[in-house]
Amino acid sequence: MNEQNATAPQRAQGHRSDQPAPGQDLAVAAESLFLANLLLVPVLSFAVLFWLWRKHADAPPLARNHLKQTCYVSLWGGLILAVFTAAFLALGGLQWAWTWVLVIMYFTCVHSTLVICGMFGLARAMAGKPFRFPLIGPKLET
Amino acid sequence: MQYKSQAVAKPYFIAAIGLFIGQILFGLVLGLQYVLGDFLFPAIPFNVARMVHTNLLIVWLLFGFMGAAYYLIPEEAETELFSPKLALALFWIFLVAGALTIVGYLTVPYATLAQLTGNDLLATMGREFLEQPLPTKLGIVVVALAFLFNITMTVLKGRKTSIALVLLLGLWGLAVFFLFSFYNPANIVVDKFFWWWVVHLWVEGVWELILGAMLAFVLIKVTGVDREVIEKWLYVIVTLTLITGIIGTGHHYFWIGTPEYWQWWGSIFSALEPIPFFAMTVFAFNMVNRRRREHPNKAAVLWALGTGVMAFLGAGIWGFLHTLAPVNYYTHGTQITAAHGHMAFYGAYVMVNLTMISYAMPLLRGRAANSNKAQVFEMWSFWLMTVAMVFITLFLTAAGILQVWLQRVSDSPVPFMVGQDQVALFYWMREWAGVAFLIGLIVYVISFFVKGEEKAA
Ligand code: HEM
Ligand code: HEM
Ligand SMILES: [Fe+2]
């Protein structure tokens, strides 16, 4: 997988299934909150996620990686979702069939892409590995 | 391959792929008839082609499951299959019965077929997915019971692993729920009520257990992750499946004449049905991230991960899309349903069978993995078929939204066929995506014949 994305110390951390990597709990929490923000409790989940990111400024690199990625991508992803959906609705109007074709297709595709990426992130966090969201995830620090 | 008797899986896999090709060809015929109504008329009417398309799908998936069980059970139970001869005999019985049924569909008018095959003795025909004539249905039961006897005896005399037990539970469930296809009460509400006990409780119940067990088996093999870790996941998946899927049946009881409380029960429980699919995806990726070895069969790993993603999208997302009663009120029986049906069947059950075949076939042919070149072909076919299916789904979804608007939301609703004319462009695009799918399938078949340097088993 994205082995090349891992920084040297992170790669060295290894991922033995019997002992969690340092910062793994926070990393898993970050990805879970990211997903909860998309699937269960929007906004509130993000608020908690953001608070965790601020609070744990000196957490282990694994945790920082996942906190930063999920915060950025929640913001950018949310923005892309909301702005274009609103734009389509505003431009097309609620009374036009194609508005709904576009809005529902757009929202479903972007939303489910974000969810799938969050699941990849969660799987990596649970394996004690760093993750970079494709396209809109911030660059990994080295 | 560790046990000689696992070899009986091979003809099952080959037949599965053969029937898969037939299914897709009929899919393309259907897609063309959607836009060119006279295509192949009167030789192959739409309703017949549809029946062949869906029945071939179900039958080849069953061939795949049986092949998978014959491969998986001896290895898990650490003993030879109870009776390889029985397995081989059943293969031929099932294949001949299946072929005769398809020939019957294509050559005899359906009403005549019903007359010829004793539908007046026990009327079971004429219902979607359960169109098979009585003798075929009875044949399916006999084959299923003999098959279950064979693999259950194998497990009883050998090691009992969680994977084998979950697989057995799923397969027994499959057979038991099929019995409801013989129950066809005159009251159409009661009929539909129990029809879903076959259809829904299969794909959102017992088949999910089969899916979980097959995926777990392949993941153990290709990642080398500890069995205990994988088994824990499997228990979670099984539990979530049963908690959500059984009462989730209610999402089919919104508007068929059943009591109104089903709108609540069905909406709430089926809204939770994506959770086991979610767990399966995270499970598959987590295992591959924690892998302890690089398995030479890269294609099998790709199929396993793809199954997770596409099952979640098709069943989880596209299922949730129309599962709440207030939404389903508008979307019920539209192209939204077809979009979901295609991606869910492909993502979950087609792909898990191809995962198993991808892993087991090289071993059945005496090597750990196919040559790199053959794997490149196989991975191309993975992407072609998967991307094509994504497009089929998207075009059908777009057609569905438009259809809902035109027929059910608009202030001046149009009749069904007028609406269909207006979405024809999407049907054309669906057909082209279907052609891409067929090309992917051809590449897939070719991959079995590509030579190159192979790794010994
Ligand atoms: C792999 C699993 C699944 C498969 C193979 C599958 C397949 C199908 C198929 C073929 C149909 C159409 C049946 C017919 O009327 O002929 C259908 C209907 C439906 N499915 Fe699924 N499905 C799966 C999982 C799910 C899940 C998880 C949900 C909900 C979250 C869901 C929600 C629905 C609903 C609401 C309908 C009824 C659509 C209507 O009212 O027309 N499905 N499914
Ligand atoms: C070449 C690609 C394919 C094309 C063009 C195609 C086309 C069609 C068409 C036109 C129908 C009838 C829909 C209706 O009655 O409204 C249909 C039904 C169906 N097809 Fe396909 N199909 C293709 C591939 C597949 C594949 C790969 C699968 C399974 C993985 C599949 C599963 C189904 C199912 C489950 C139904 C019944 C859907 C329902 O009841 O809503 N098809 N297909
Ligand atoms: Fe269902």
Image (cartoon, coloured by chain):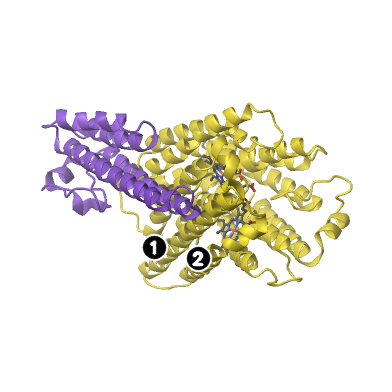
The tint of chain A in the picture is purple
Quadrant for residue A19, please give it: top left
- The residue shown at (39%, 55%) is B302
| Front label number (1 vs 2) | 2
Where does the image place residue B399, in percent across and percent down from the top left? 54, 57
| Residue A99 at x, y percent in the picture | 45, 52
Mark 1 residue CB less than 8 A from any atom of ligand 2: no
Residue B98 in the image, given as x and y percentages of width and height: 71, 58
Q: Is residue B39 above or below residue B8?
A: below
Quadrant of the image for the C terminus of chain B? bottom left
- Taking depth in this image into account, of B330 and B140 the one nearest to the observer is B330
Element under disc 2: helix
Residue B288 visible: no
In front of the other: B9 or B176: B176
Q: Secondary structure at mark 1?
A: strand
- Amino acid, disc 2: Ala
| Whether the residue under disc 2 has CB within 8 Å of ligand 2 | yes
**Residues beneath discs 1 and 2 located on the same chain:** yes
User: Residue B281 placed where, x, y %?
Assistant: 41, 43
Q: Which mark is residue B456?
A: 1
Looking at the rendered structure, the number of numbered marks drawn on it comes to 2
Residue type at the position of mark 1: Ala
Ligand 2 placement by image quarter? bottom right
**Residue B433, label in figure:** 2
Q: Colour of chain B?
A: yellow
Look at 68% across and 72% down and name the residue there. B39
Say which residue appears at 54% left-offset and 49% top-offset. Answer: B340
